[in-house]
């Protein structure tokens, strides 16, 4: 049976022992909540659901859907965040090749994979309550004080603090490590203007005034301004990643380092060791996937105190912002483009992926504006594919281009607000967020949806609304553009976003002027704040990337970072780059497209295994290589290790990736 040590223990009181410097609470740390889970009815990894519960077709129900408890919200947040990253279809390998019940030796057990331990939650803030990066440390009861280790689990995407529970979190907990999580300032924090309510750290809803500094996110608007906006734009919402006005990505590395500091503080108070846990005697691996992977790499770059020993990440959304000084070759041929920033390639994708997905009117509007060739939808779609490849997407990602259209729209709009530190009231390019019905008309979030938002939203809630659509505001995918009168999924709005990325009008080619120019400069200044240096300070690192990734194209993600690192660190660098064929950004496609896609998740765990063996016992890191997987012939065929060969300790020239200063050479 679990018990609550305290609901909200001040950091000063949390200090159980002042005998070690590491026990002193970091200055950024706010009140700390502590709870132990006994590992039967509730636990750290599965919230008591076990492997069978995580694989269920539906999330557990709430006793009162309008007033879910904090424990219920945590449980369902773990359910949804776990499944957002990992394919829980047993035929895809869940429960046999990976999952809570699979041991660290890769052998599935008969248990449910529950892990007992203690969970610590706090905000990192400057005292203003306007930053409130959520930090969490999970310490399993199996933590070995003689072989201490910490693994970071910074959230992926725009998810809340449980966003890495199934990736770095699961690996760390199974290995008896403390796991240091962070929502990196982007996590679940839904603000609804209609009722002036926010999420508390527990996920429970509260009025903004009552929440005060305990809100995950609250916009900086006085009551008069809020009321006026809610009256003029009913049913709109704001959320942390887009509307905090902090450009959170600029601090992702800092947030990850803060989570490590919090973990050391927790360990030194939780266990009260005779000798303090500190970087010199505790293995620390920075890990996670996607945005969290980018945060881990940025943390390693910014780690001037030696907190991090090594890095093992997958599909990193990390931005180098340059293509000069290094080449990326595939099959001996330079790739079409590499090293572009997220906002650059996301706004490009937001133009063309809808056409690739079969939206004929989007194709037609692009062609009418001279942005596509051809007079038939088939020819126009073929040109859209060609343009995407020329902009850096691998041909292997063609199959997934169309299905990523909606996701890239969410990314383009969210990051536009984030990078430019724009307010929700700015209505950038006529785009805001809210809820819409099946006809695209704005409607209020239901009471249940608001109450359960902490558990059910990924950090980007609701629909993208186009305020300037013909006939009035509509969800973008059903919106007609003023310039054409066509229901082209609001193309005008995304041409506007594209102009902010480049500084020029994408149709006329003319430089921006006036307010649009000011917005573009402001946004691009925010992008400049997030650029990675490529300097890991000699730390060993393993970067895993799926070759078929249509979300974060390898040429702009893992490949670009590996190439820049080789340029910057030269022969002193210790980065290994692992590229997995037939793997992409979202493992769920291993179920929906089984004849083409395999899960990438097992290879993150192999990278973590290799890094841990290297740091603990000096085992050599695997060489950079292509891992050639074999998709299943159908969704009825179980995934096996024949489909997912291991990362190899020795590889021949056919599979060897060569990293040298100025060149990253990858075999076909």
Image (cartoon, rainbow, N blue to C red):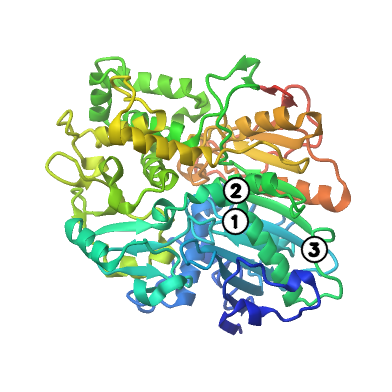
55 vs 226, left or right, is right
What's the CA distance linking mark 1 and mark 2?
8 Å
Q: Nearer the viewer, residue 458 or 89?
A: 458
Q: Is residue 627 visible?
A: no
298 vs 447: above or below: above
Find residue 247 and report its horizontal and vertical position in percent: 47, 49
Residue 652 has which mark? none
266 vs 394, left or right, is right
Find residue 604 and report its horizontal and vertical position in percent: 66, 46
Question: Which residue is at a point 35% across and 74% down the rendered structure image?
Answer: 209
Query: How crowded is the residue under tag 3: few (<14 C-alpha within 10 Å), some, or many (20+)?
Result: some
Question: Which residue is at a point 32% across and 75% down the rendered structure image?
Answer: 66
Q: Kindly identify which residue carries mark 1.
A: 255
Mark 3: secondary structure? loop
207 vs 106: above or below: below
Residue 295 has which mark? 2
Find residue 274 and report its horizontal and vertical position in percent: 86, 75
Mark 2: secondary structure? helix
Q: Nearer the viewer, residue 63 or 343?
A: 343
485 vs 8: above or below: above
Q: Is residue 436 visible?
A: yes
Q: Nearer the viewer, residue 245 or 461?
A: 245
For discs 1 and 2, the disc positioned in front in the rendered view: 1
Q: Kindly identify which residue carries mark 3.
A: 278
């Amino acid at each position: 049976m679990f018990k609550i040590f305290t609901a909200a223990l001040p950091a000063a009181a949390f200090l159980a022992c002042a005998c070690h410097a590491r026990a002193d609470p970091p200055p950024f740390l706010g009140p700390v909540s502590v709870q132990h889970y006994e590992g039967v009815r509730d636990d750290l990894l599965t919230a008591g659901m076990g492997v069978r519960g995580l694989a269920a077709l539906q999330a557990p129900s709430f006793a009162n859907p309008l007033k879910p408890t904090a424990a219920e919200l945590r449980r369902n947040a773990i359910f949804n965040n776990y499944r957002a990253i990992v394919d829980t279809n047993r035929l895809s390998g869940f429960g046999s090749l990976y999952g809570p019940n699979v041991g660290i030796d890769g052998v599935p057990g008969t248990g449910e994979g529950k892990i007992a331990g203690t969970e610590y939650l706090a905000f990192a803030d400057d005292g203003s309550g306007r930053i409130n990066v959520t930090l969490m440390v999970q310490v399993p009861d199996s933590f070995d004080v003689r072989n201490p280790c910490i693994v970071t689990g910074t959230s992926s995407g725009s998810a809340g603090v449980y966003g890495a529970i199934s990736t770095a979190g699961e690996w760390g907990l199974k290995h008896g490590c403390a796991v240091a999580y962070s929502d990196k300032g982007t996590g679940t924090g839904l603000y609804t203007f209609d009722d002036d309510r926010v999420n508390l750290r527990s996920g429970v809803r509260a009025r903004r005034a009552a929440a005060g500094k305990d809100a995950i996110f609250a916009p900086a608007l006085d009551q008069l301004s809020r009321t006026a906006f809610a009256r003029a734009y009913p049913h709109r919402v704001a959320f942390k990643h887009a509307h905090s006005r902090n450009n959170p990505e600029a601090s992702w590395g800092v947030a990850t380092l803060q989570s490590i500091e919090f973990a050391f503080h927790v360990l030194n108070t939780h266990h009260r060791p005779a000798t303090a846990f500190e970087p010199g005697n505790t293995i620390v691996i920075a890990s996670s996937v996607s945005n969290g992977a980018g945060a881990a790499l940025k943390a390693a770059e910014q780690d001037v105190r030696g907190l991090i020993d090594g890095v093992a990440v997958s599909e990193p959304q990390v931005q180098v912002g340059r293509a000069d000084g290094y080449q990326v070759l595939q099959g001996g041929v330079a790739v079409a483009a590499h090293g572009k920033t997220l906002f650059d390639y996301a706004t490009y994708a937001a133009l063309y992926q809808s056409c690739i997905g079969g939206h004929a009117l989007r194709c037609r509007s692009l062609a009418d504006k001279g942005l596509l060739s051809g007079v038939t939808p088939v020819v126009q779609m073929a040109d859209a594919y060609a343009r995407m490849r020329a902009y850096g997407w691998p041909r292997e990602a063609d199959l997934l281009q169309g299905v990523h259209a909606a996701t890239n729209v969410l990314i383009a709009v969210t990051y536009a607000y984030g990078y430019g530190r724009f307010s929700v009231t700015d209505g950038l390019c006529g785009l805001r967020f809210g809820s819409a019905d099946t006809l695209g008309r704005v409607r209020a979030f239901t009471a249940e949806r608001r109450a359960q938002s902490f558990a059910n939203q990924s950090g980007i809630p609701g629909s993208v609304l186009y305020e300037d659509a013909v006939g009035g505001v509509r969800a973008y995918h059903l919106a007609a553009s003023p310039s054409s009168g066509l229901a082209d999924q609001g193309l005008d709005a995304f041409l506007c976003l594209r102009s902010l990325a480049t500084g020029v009008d994408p149709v006329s080619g003319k430089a921006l002027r006036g307010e649009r120019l000011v917005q573009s400069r402001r946004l691009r200044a925010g992008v400049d704040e997030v650029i990675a240096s490529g300097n890991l300070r000699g730390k060993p690192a393993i970067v895993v990337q799926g070759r078929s990734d249509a979300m974060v194209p390898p040429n702009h993600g893992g490949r670009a970072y590996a190439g820049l690192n080789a340029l910057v660190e030269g022969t002193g660098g210790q980065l290994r780059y692992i590229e997995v064929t037939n793997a992409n950004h979202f493992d769920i496609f291993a179920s929906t497209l089984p004849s083409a896609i395999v899960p990438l998740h097992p290879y993150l765990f192999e990278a973590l295994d290799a890094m841990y063996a290297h740091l603990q016992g000096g085992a050599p890191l695997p060489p950079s290589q292509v891992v050639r997987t074999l998709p299943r012939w159908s969704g009825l065929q179980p995934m096996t290790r024949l489909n997912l060969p291991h990362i190899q300790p020795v590889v021949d020239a056919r599979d060897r990736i060569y990293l040298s200063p100025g060149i990253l050479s990858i075999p076909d």
